[in-house]
């Protein structure tokens, strides 16, 4: 058995102060006349209703279940209550009040958290690290690190995760904690920000009944202790799990079928001649009642649903709910503490630290890419093996430079999955108000620098001398610099394209296309001197691969001579022809390149990289999903 850490023992001795988690200000969340319609692209008359006239309330210290068949509107309602965008082309009407008062969306978001259906956990972090980073990303600098650790311990204990504190969450190749523990961890990492209201979308999806029960049981104990308001959509809980909830809001086809405390469900349906059988799971009974999707007789099922809807509308229970939420809504009486955010610098540092841990623990994210580049280096080194400095090598040297510059940049597509994964985590964390696009983009850029430099260095160490490029230290490090800038630009393009089109296959196809374009107009396949004006003026000058190719060409040919070989038939005419040699500058002239422009080209490369990154930031800032 894993030993219990002293800090956890402290907690067990009830030496904990949970004041920061306890809700003393928010008494209730109410919602009135929520209507959501899907707008037709043609006419308003063709709009279809997703939610209609939904009233309800939840009080501090209660756990409300949002149930209904698939497509009944649970997630949509949860999004409306949390002031999240429920989707494009949807029009939302109705009001959501806190303590009976209307508050701005930003205030509601600052006192609430939303746990999405899919866990947004980073597989290579341990359970404790996950909570610690959640704390570092959300807590203001006024909370000292000792206090932060204490809060982490508290949550580990509250969610029964203290024995898994040092186990990793789990990656595709390394088994970590169980599905139920993951869900508990997702909830705990939201609670570290001390929300007063917690929205959970299917907190038990994908779990067996025992794990589901555990998740809701832990949640219930925290809700009771901390006086939180929790609203959770749930699919088909077991009887034991269902019994843990205080209230139920039952939806079907976007309308209410029941809304009230659990003990009143049975009498409510009995009074409508729908008695609940004795030995049946109440949740199953309710879902059977409200589901029409798989009915043999659709007309009959529709009629049954309409009866349920009108029974609720006309019931005294519905009138009581409407009366309870209809009270005048004022602008005062809500004490929203101004939740201070973690400072920009601390957030960026925490994101860098988190990415660093991921980079050395997650083989899929970084290790595989590294191995791929090494394989490529060995292949390139041995294909163009020890080229002699004769004119017959000028072609192969040029080809090797093209291959090295173009293919390395092309292979940046391998970064797409890792970037999209990081972006998904960011989108979820931003939606919960943790941090914005700037720290994410800065951390993403900075963590890539040493890694890309290492790849450039190792790749060059293998290929440069095996190929027999110009053997001086200066030439070697200039080559490393060009490769590094090449990879940096390639990765910046991946960041930009994947931010605009965050769909794996689409991003992959577009980046491959862009690389094909850069290769075609880069100057190797068609010399810039004869490239037609459209491609030359529209694309050639913004093609980063073109500058890498030029830089590497100048690095090799600008300062080296080649023997013309037997018969002294020199392929390129230069001042050294009389010595039966070719001055490499003659090769450069063919392409229109010359020495002395390296500084300018490096400047252009840096500008291209900056533009890609800034555009990537702007898109990420504006695009919310
Ligand atoms: N952005 C949107 N645009 C168009 N239709 C939408 C949008 N969001 C939801 N809907 C529709 O609204 C209905 C309710 O969807 P919602 O996701 O809220 O249901 P749910 O009860 O959460 O379903 P499930 O249990 O399967 O997750 C569905 O018919 C869905 O197709």
Image (cartoon, rainbow, N blue to C red):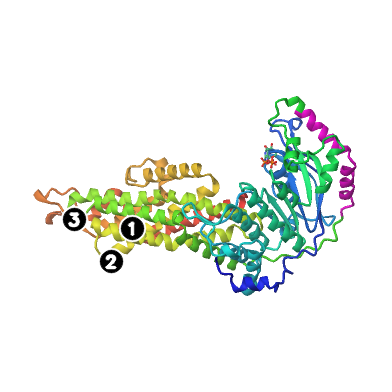
Disc 3 to disc 2: CB gap under 8 Å:
no
Q: Secondary structure at mark 2?
A: helix
The stretch drawn in magenta includes residue 309: yes
Which residue in the structure is indicated by mark 2? 473
Image position, residue 98 (x, y; %)? 81, 56
Measured as percent of width and height from the top left, residue 565 is found at: 12, 51
Q: Which residues are magenta?
A: 301-329
Question: Quick check: can you spot residue 143?
Answer: no
Ligand 1: quadrant of the figure = top right
- Residue drawn at point x = 37 percent, y = 55 percent: 371
Q: Which disc is residue 389 wearing?
A: 3
Residue 451 within the magenta-colored segment of the rendering: no
Q: Which comes sooner in the sequence, label 2 or label 1? A: 1
Q: Earlier along the polypeptide chain: callout 1 or callout 3?
A: 3
Please report contact status of discs 2 and 1: CB closer than 8 Å, yes or no: no
- Would residue 530 be seen by someone viewing this image from the given angle? yes
Identity of the residue furthest to the front in this view:
279
**Mark in front: 1 vs 3:** 1
Packing grade of label 2 (10 A; few <14, some 14-19, many >=20) is few
Q: CA distance from mark 3 to mark 2?
A: 18 Å
**Farthest-out residue, left:** 567
Residue for badge 1? 459
């Amino acid at each position: 058995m894993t030993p219990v850490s002293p800090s956890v023992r402290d907690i067990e001795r009830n030496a904990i102060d949970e004041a920061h988690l306890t809700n003393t200000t928010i008494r209730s969340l109410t919602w009135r006349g929520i209507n959501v319609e899907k707008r037709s692209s043609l006419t308003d008359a063709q709009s279809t209703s997703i939610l209609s006239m939904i009233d309800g309330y939840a009080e501090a210290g209660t756990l409300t279940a949002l149930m209904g068949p698939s497509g009944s509107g649970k997630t949509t309602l949860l999004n409306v209550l949390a002031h999240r965008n429920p989707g494009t082309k949807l029009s939302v009407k109705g009001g959501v009040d806190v303590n009976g008062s209307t508050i701005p969306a930003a205030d509601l978001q600052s006192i609430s958290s939303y746990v999405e259906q899919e866990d947004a956990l980073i597989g290579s972090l341990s359970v404790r690290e996950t909570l610690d980073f959640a704390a570092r990303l959300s807590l203001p600098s006024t909370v000292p690190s000792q206090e932060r650790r204490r809060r982490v311990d508290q949550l580990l204990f509250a969610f029964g995760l203290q024995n898994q504190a040092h186990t990793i969450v789990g990656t595709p190749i390394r088994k970590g904690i169980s599905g139920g523990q993951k869900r508990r961890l997702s909830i705990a990492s939201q609670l570290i920000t001390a929300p007063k209201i917690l929205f959970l979308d299917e907190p038990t999806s994908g779990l067996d009944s025992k794990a589901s029960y555990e998740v809701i049981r832990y949640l219930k104990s925290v809700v009771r202790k901390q006086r939180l308001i929790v609203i959770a959509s749930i699919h088909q809980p077991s009887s034991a799990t269902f019994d843990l909830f205080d209230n139920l809001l039952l939806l079907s086809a976007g309308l209410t079928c029941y809304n009230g405390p659990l003990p009143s469900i049975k009498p409510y349906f009995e009074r409508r001649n729908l008695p609940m059988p004795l030995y049946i799971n109440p949740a199953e009974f309710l879902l059977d009642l409200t589901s029409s999707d798989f009915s043999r007789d659709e007309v009959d099922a529709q009629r049954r649903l309409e009866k349920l809807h009108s029974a609720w509308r006309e019931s005294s229970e519905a009138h009581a709910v409407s009366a309870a939420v209809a009270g005048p809504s004022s602008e005062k009486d809500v004490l929203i503490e101004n939740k201070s955010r973690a400072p920009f610098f601390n957030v960026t540092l925490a994101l860098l630290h988190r990415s660093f841990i991921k980079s050395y623990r997650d083989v899929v994210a970084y290790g595989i890419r590294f191995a791929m580049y090494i394989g490529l280096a060995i292949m390139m080194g041995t294909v163009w093996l020890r080229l002699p400095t004769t004119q017959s090598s000028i072609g192969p040297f040029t080809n090797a430079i093209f291959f090295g510059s173009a293919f390395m940049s092309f292979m940046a597509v391998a970064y797409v999955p890792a970037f999209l994964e990081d972006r998904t985590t960011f989108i979820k964390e931003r939606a919960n108000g943790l941090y914005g696009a700037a720290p994410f983009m800065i951390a993403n850029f900075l963590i890539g620098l040493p890694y890309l430099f290492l790849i450039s260095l190792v790749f060059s160490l293998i290929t440069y001398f095996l190929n027999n490029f110009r053997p001086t230290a200066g030439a070697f490090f200039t080559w490393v610099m060009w490769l590094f800038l090449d990879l940096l630009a390639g990765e910046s393009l991946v960041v930009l394209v994947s931010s605009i089109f965050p769909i794996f296959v689409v991003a992959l196809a577009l980046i491959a296309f862009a690389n094909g374009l850069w290769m075609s107009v880069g100057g190797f396949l068609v010399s810039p001197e004869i490239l037609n004006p459209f491609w030359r003026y529209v694309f050639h000058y913004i093609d980063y691969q073109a500058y890498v190719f030029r830089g590497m060409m100048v690095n090799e040919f600008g300062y080296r001579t080649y023997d013309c070989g037997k018969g002294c038939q020199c392929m390129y005419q230069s001042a050294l022809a009389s010595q039966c040699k070719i001055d490499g500058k003659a090769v450069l002239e063919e392409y229109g390149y010359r020495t002395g422009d390296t500084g300018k080209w490096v400047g252009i490369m840096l500008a291209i990289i900056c533009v890609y990154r800034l555009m990537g930031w702007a898109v990420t800032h504006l695009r919310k999903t």
